[in-house]
Image (tube, helix red, strand yellow):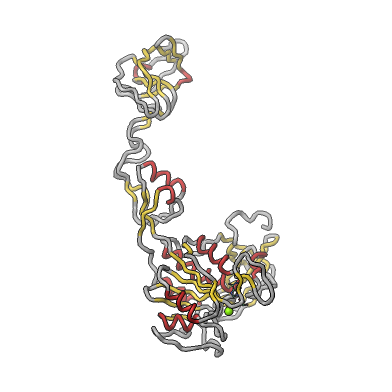
Amino acid sequence: MATRQRPGASRDVRMRGFAERADVEDVERFLAGRTLPLGAESVPLLECAGRVLAGGIVSEVDVPGFARSAMDGYAVRGEDTFGASDYDPLSLEVIGVALPGRPFDGEMGVQQAVRIMTGAPVPAGADAVVMAEVCEEQGGRVVVSEPVAPRKNVGVRGEDIRAGSAVLPSGRRLRPQDAGLLASIGIADVACVRRPRVRLVITGDELLAPGETPSGARIVDSNSVVLRALVERDGGVCLPYEILPDVPERISAALAEPGADVVLVSGGSSVGQEDHAPRLVAELGTLDFHGVAMRPSSPTGVGRLPGERFVFLLPGNPVSCLCAYEFFAGPTLRRLGGRSAEWPHRRVRLPLARKISSAIGRVDYVRVAVEDGQVVPLATSGASILSSTVRATGAVIVPRGLEGMPDGAEVEVLLYDSESVEGPL
Ligand code: AMP
Ligand code: MG
């Protein structure tokens, strides 16, 4: 394994380059083997949609808790209507009204009816509801011109959910309708997997804060903007952060600060003179990997800080930063949050319009456009060219064992957009 180090080791690789690089799969396996969902926290019902259930839910109640009318009409005893027709209608005595939330609180006898609206409790003594369309009420009586079978138009108690039944499994990512169902069984707070807390440590003497205008030799920090959105997508929460200069003491203090489950360092991850983060991580905890056989993002590092917090050293080049996040930090955040580690992108399989070159032993993350049903690798693809990811429809991953992919080969594209790609397809 490339540059694996023991806790506390502080081998300084600055200006010496990587001796070897780890395989992407080894890093992925390492992370997968050490990541379990975080504990549970109580989430108010109104905020639970999209969250992951920390335990299965069993209903303690029947829904509905009473037999209810499925129609506007008249509650009757079905057998009292037998034989009713247009030519030979039957007449029943109307003894009251049942509305949703306002039941009729008497008992209905033979040849009697109660006017009833959808959702109202069916009165004692009634076993069916005859719909308003075949009834005519006049002077305290209703004339019924169609028979109705017992149980017809009556929703039985518990028809939606029965008390004691399992309604949602542990690990479920709650859909809007799931949250509605939890409301319907009387739940106010939901035990959900805690969202991983992420500290961004954005480093670089050259950086201006997002919102500022680039000037002279200074560039605007775009990585934090991208990372925040990715963390949000993957269910994490970013803690407040600041942009730090390439000053070891400042970076070290940020790494040591408690409160985060995962630390993402942007910039200074390589072997340059101002690349302090790898050494600092090795001093504070373990630098498990430094240098990965991939393009872009080869100067990526993965380590652990005290308290079993993962730290990802993401190269400063914007495409590298995005790519290293997607390969390593994203799956880790999703696992911690109880979600699937799978890449969340929609995928399509389409033929390559032009070949992609790679090298055996290296994983490539290639930005592509989808044009006329074909996959076109983008020419300007340097790790510093953020606009390549903006022009791209998605990315193709060339696995380690391939030298490249020939034109015409069918490839899988990880699409950047979740909506339909009608149009270019
Ligand atoms: P580094 O990984 O620190 O060697 O940076 C590599 C390249 O990425 C340099 O050109 C940096 O100026 C640039 N860079 C570093 N951090 C950021 C950032 N937060 N946003 C945009 N570009 C960055
Ligand atoms: Mg730098």
Residue 137 image-quadrant placement: top left
Viewer-nearest residue: 397 or 10: 10
Point out residue 51 in the picture as x, y percentages from the top left corner: 43, 55
Question: Is residue 242 found left or right of 405 in the rendered image?
Answer: left
Q: Tell me if residue 96 can be seen.
A: yes
Viewer-nearest residue: 162 or 212: 212
- The quadrant of the picture showing ligand 2 is bottom right
Work out whether 61 lies above or below 22. Answer: above
Question: Is residue 96 found left or right of 229 in the rendered image?
Answer: left
Q: Which residue is rendered at x = 67% and y = 57% of the image? A: 425
Point out residue 60 in the picture as x, y percentages from the top left corner: 30, 43
Which residue occupies the extreme bottom position in the image? 16
Residue 324 image-quadrant placement: bottom right
Q: Which residue is rendered at x = 49% and y = 65% of the image? A: 240
Q: Which residue is rendered at x = 57% and y = 57% of the image? A: 418
Residue 366 image-quadrant placement: bottom right
Point out residue 307 in the picture as x, y percentages from the top left corner: 37, 73
Viewer-nearest residue: 101 or 135: 101
